[in-house]
Image (spheres, rainbow, N blue to C red):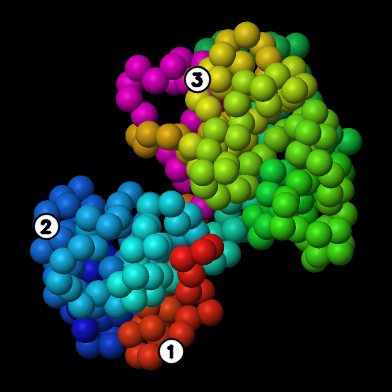
Amino acid sequence: MKIVVSELNWPIGNELLAAKGWEVVYDPDLWKDREKLRRELKTADALIVRNRTKVDAQLLEGEHRLKVIGRLGVGLDNIDLQTAAKKNIAVVYGKNANAASVAEYVMAAIFASVRLLREASDDVRQGGWDRKRFTGTELYGKTVGLIGVGEIGHRVAVRAKAFGMRVLGTDPIVGSYDFPIMETGIELVSFDRVVAEADFLSLHVPLTPRTRHMIDRGVLERMKTTAFLINSARGGIVNESDLDFALQNGIIAGAVLDVLEQEPPPPDHPLLQRENCIITPHIAGLTEESQVRTAAMVANEVIGELEGRVSLYRVHAGK
């Protein structure tokens, strides 16, 4: 068997594959060279990717023996599931392996928005002692609004509740008696109510035609002027031009973005100029612990598929 890994993978994943006696072609920059990747895939049994390898119809066309694609993470918008299904290529992913890490990132984003520790420390190092300027805001009693109440949203709710926060959520496929609602005390309400009442609006939905640019100027204008937007899901969910307008004009207080429509952004991207916008390089799910789990999980699921076992984490084209 030959396994091609075209992006960054933690050692445990490659070691598990190599322990089977299989050939592992590991090049974390292979995604940048489409032609080289296509050549490798002609004799590959499996391909393992993150979110930068565009596994589209063009990449999958032609003669090859590819049987399975492993996704190191949960987002699937870079994989053409329809084409994979037509070619009988299984797709497996690291379901929930980084959910705790993303939830902790969201809490860190909330704290970064209201308790300016780094800024206060820098000010002190420069001779300042401006206690008034760095007066913070309590989380106790504030409202977290969740757009999407799946595994990550549920974990955010658990952590927010521990700080005495109120949690509102909206999700078209979650019911009032489902576990995330019953066991965490999330108030399941309408999308409009979540937007209007949230002090921190956190996005936890996949990027689909339905969710693309779902956060636009109209939504932003219905948020509190003191509210913060947090996006650790996918960049295309937010209309970045509308967000830039909202940040410039005081429509909302600020934003924390771990994802953008173009990653990395061009140097002249307007959001890079906004002091009330924190941007991080798609690291919400990146912790040492989550990456060990993800690498091991995806490797084991790829191994299982190649040995004839159907993975619990196989994705179907209609997902």
Q: Nearer the viewer, residue 263 or 174?
A: 174
Residue occupying the point 68% across, 57% down: 150
Q: Does the magenta stretch include residue 61?
A: no
Three-letter amino acid code at the position of disc 3: Ser
Of the two numbered discs 1 and 2 on the same chain, state the one appearing first in sequence. Answer: 2
Three-letter amino acid code at the position of disc 1: Arg
Find residue 6 and report its horizontal and vertical position in percent: 25, 60
Residue 36 circle label: 2
Which stretch appears magenta? 265-285
Image side of residue 296 versus residue 148, left or right:
left
Residue 224 circle label: none
Residue count near mark 2 (Cα–Cα under 10 Å), binned few <14, some 14–19, many ≥20 = few
Image side of residue 222 versus residue 279, left or right:
right
Q: Quadrant of the N terminus?
A: bottom left
Residue 241 circle label: 3
Q: Are marks 1 and 2 in contact (CB under 8 Å)?
A: no
Task: Work out how far the residue at label 1 is from the one at label 2, CA to CA, in angstroms.
Answer: 30 Å
Find residue 132 and report its horizontal and vertical position in percent: 75, 11
